[in-house]
Amino acid sequence: MSDTLKTFDDLNFEAEVLRSSEPVLVDFWAPWCPPCRMIAPFVEALAEEFQGRVKVGKLDVDQSPETADRYQITGIPCLLLFKDGQVVDQRVGALPRAEIARMLEALEPEPVQG
């Protein structure tokens, strides 16, 4: 994993995600999940690309069942996008890199036309 891709768990979720001053993309996944492994390189690349604008990390649902249950994660991979401690977007399944990038780009303000 790259230095920009965070690891979230039941112990650090509140501090790292819910109290984060920047938006956070959380990839709920498990090592035994082929679609999770398929999108992993996309998530890692986007962590690099959006560094300083969006915090990106992964949460293993088997290792952190309390957080997975709290957000009713029943299918993985599941991407939850948090802003100010609230879920603002959610996608389930193996998504193309471009769709995940659009989730993150939607957080950025529109340029002022003038």
Image (tube, rainbow, N blue to C red):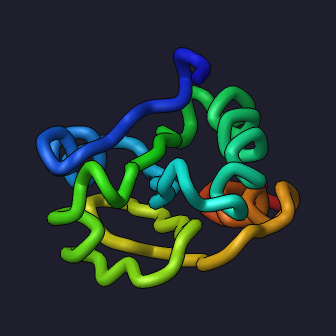
State the image coordinates of residue 5 (x, y, percent, origin top left): 53, 30
Dividing the picture into quarters, in which one does residue 109 lie? bottom right
- In the image, is 84 to the left or to the right of 88? left
Query: Is residue 53 in sight in this rendering?
Result: yes
* Residue 73 location (% of width, % of height): 38, 78
Quick check: can you spot residue 114? no
Task: Tell whether 43 sits left or right of 62.
Answer: right
Residue shown at the point (60%, 78%) measured from the top left: 92
Q: Residue at x 56, y 37 (%)?
A: 53
- Judged left or right of residue 81, residue 106 is right
Q: Quadrant of the C terminus?
A: bottom right
Left or right placement of residue 37 versus residue 90 in this view = right
In this rendering, the answer to whether 88 lies above or below 105 is below
Residue at 60% across, 19% down: 2
Vertical relation: 26 (above or below) 9: below
The one of 78 and 47 positioned closer to us in this rendering: 78
- Along the viewing direction, whichever of 110 and 93 lies nearer the viewer: 93
Report how many numbered discs are placed on residues in the image.
0
Position of the N terminus by quadrant? top right
Residue 85 position by quadrant? bottom left
Residue 69 horizontal/vertical position (percent): 23, 75
**Residue extending furthest toward the front:** 32
